[in-house]
């Protein structure tokens, strides 16, 4: 049963859409003064990467090498900002250095990269050239990693209940999400706790999921562009994202949803035309995906949004302790995932389609941006 779940998970964001049923509508929340607080950093590097259904990316220490998941070949590819390939490793299987279903990559100490294989319920630590350093078994049903997005002596993650009733009951994140922390050297489970219930109300009525704030307290993502910042003492503050527009899906959004639903249909989940029609006519969620929210080294929360994602994409930045919106960073093309380290932002994007793409498949790339002026 677990293997069936992880096969479906290789669809990346689509599994999360189905499992968590993220389908909220909204009215516009534009605020002109907030939308003007947008910074377009300088792009300082780019590297083409293979097509993939997964947009996860890890920026390694040194800030010049990034690693991505190639879901179709069940591999990890590492590139540098000059465009050179540093290493490509992995293949489908259950042996050392093999993957069943990759869901996350993240940076570690001394330029290492970690890979979360939810098909084999383990985490591997590698050199970017592909040398396997160690593998650690994880609690069953692990589906993602903490938004801190780095690892050292320990690894923090999220596991999900495999009981469909717990998800469909809509009781909140505490009903089906559990946090864990594992010591890498010993594989000892150091921490395991349910995401706590949220004593807060949002206008649209639904809190989707939550994660711990490394500075203390919690952050919860809700429907229609709402966020709930919970302080150390448990006091909640509800914020409506100033840059949330409530726009409808564009043609690329719909095509991406059809691709994902078709993949799930091949895995035994029927294609639901009614669900697709609802998606076409419902304003997009504010946030991009579960897992595309990252805390930077200063404790600020970055959220990849669904605004536009055609010519440009946008990341909104918050100060959780103050429950305050700080501003927006704009990048080129269609964002699929991102990572941060020091003054560097890396973004996995799909380029806009052009006559040079007669097959209708956009080029995929990792772009490096310099944030030193903004920080």
Image (cartoon, rainbow, N blue to C red):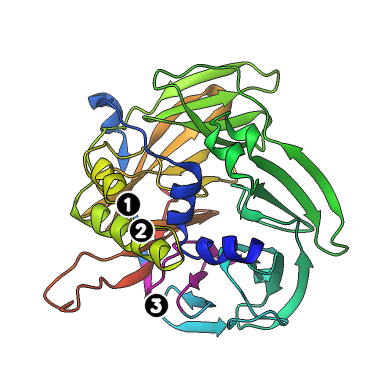
Nearer-N-terminus badge (3/2): 3
Mark 1 or 2: in front is 1
**Residue on which disc 3 sits:** 50
Above or below residue 372? Residue 115 is below
Q: Does residue 86 belong to the magenta stretch?
A: no
Please tell me which residue lies in front, 19 or 134. 19
**Residue on which disc 1 sits:** 272
Mark 1 or 3: in front is 1
Q: What is the C-alpha distance between the residues marked 3 and 2?
A: 21 Å
What SS does tag 2 mark? helix
Nearer-N-terminus badge (1/2): 2
Residue 257 horizontal side relative to residue 292, left or right = left
Residue 115 horizontal side relative to residue 332, left or right = right
Give the residue displayed 50% in from the left and 47% down from the top. Answer: 19
Above or below residue 60? Residue 88 is below
Residues in magenta, as a range:
45-72
Marking on residue 261: 2
Nearer-N-terminus badge (1/3): 3
Q: What is the C-alpha distance between the residues marked 1 and 2?
A: 8 Å
């Amino acid at each position: 049963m677990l293997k069936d779940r992880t096969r479906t998970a290789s669809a990346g964001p689509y599994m999360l859409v189905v499992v968590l049923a993220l389908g909220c509508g909204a009215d516009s929340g534009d605020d002109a003064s907030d939308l003007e607080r947008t910074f377009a950093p300088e792009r300082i590097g780019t590297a083409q990467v293979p097509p993939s259904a997964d947009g996860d990316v890890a920026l390694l220490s040194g800030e010049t090498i990034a690693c991505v998941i190639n879901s179709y070949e069940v591999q990890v590819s590492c590139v540098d900002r000059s465009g050179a390939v540093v290493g490509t490793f992995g293949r489908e299987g259950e042996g050392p250095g093999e993957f069943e279903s990759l869901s996350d990559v993240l940076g570690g100490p001394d330029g290492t990269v970690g890979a979360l294989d939810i098909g084999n319920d383990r985490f591997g630590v590698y050199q970017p050239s592909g040398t396997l350093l160690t593998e650690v078994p994880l609690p069953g049903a692990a589906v993602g990693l903490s938004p801190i997005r780095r690892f050292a002596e320990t690894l923090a993650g999220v596991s999900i209940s495999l009981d469909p009733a717990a998800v469909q009951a809509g009781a909140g994140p505490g009903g089906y999400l559990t946090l864990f922390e594992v010591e890498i050297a010993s594989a000892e489970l150091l921490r395991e706790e349910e995401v706590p219930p949220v004593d807060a109300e949002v206008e649209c009525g639904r809190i989707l999921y939550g994660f711990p704030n490394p500075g203390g307290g919690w952050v919860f993502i809700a429907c229609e562009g709402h966020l709930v910042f919970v302080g150390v003492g448990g006091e909640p503050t509800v914020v409506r994202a100033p840059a949330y527009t409530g726009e409808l899906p564009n043609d690329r959004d719909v095509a991406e949803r059809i691709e994902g639903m078709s993949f799930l249909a091949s895995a035994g989940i029927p294609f639901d035309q009614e669900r697709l029609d609802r998606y076409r006519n419902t304003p997009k969620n504010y946030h991009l995906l579960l897992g595309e929210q990252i805390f930077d080294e200063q404790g600020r929360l970055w959220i990849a949004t669904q605004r536009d994602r055609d010519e440009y994409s946008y990341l909104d930045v918050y100060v959780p302790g103050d429950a305050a919106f700080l501003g927006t960073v704009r990048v080129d093309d269609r964002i699929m995932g991102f990572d941060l380290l020091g003054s560097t932002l890396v973004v996995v994007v799909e380029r806009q389609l052009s006559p040079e793409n007669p097959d209708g498949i956009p080029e995929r790339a990792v772009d490096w941006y310099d944030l030193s002026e903004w920080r």
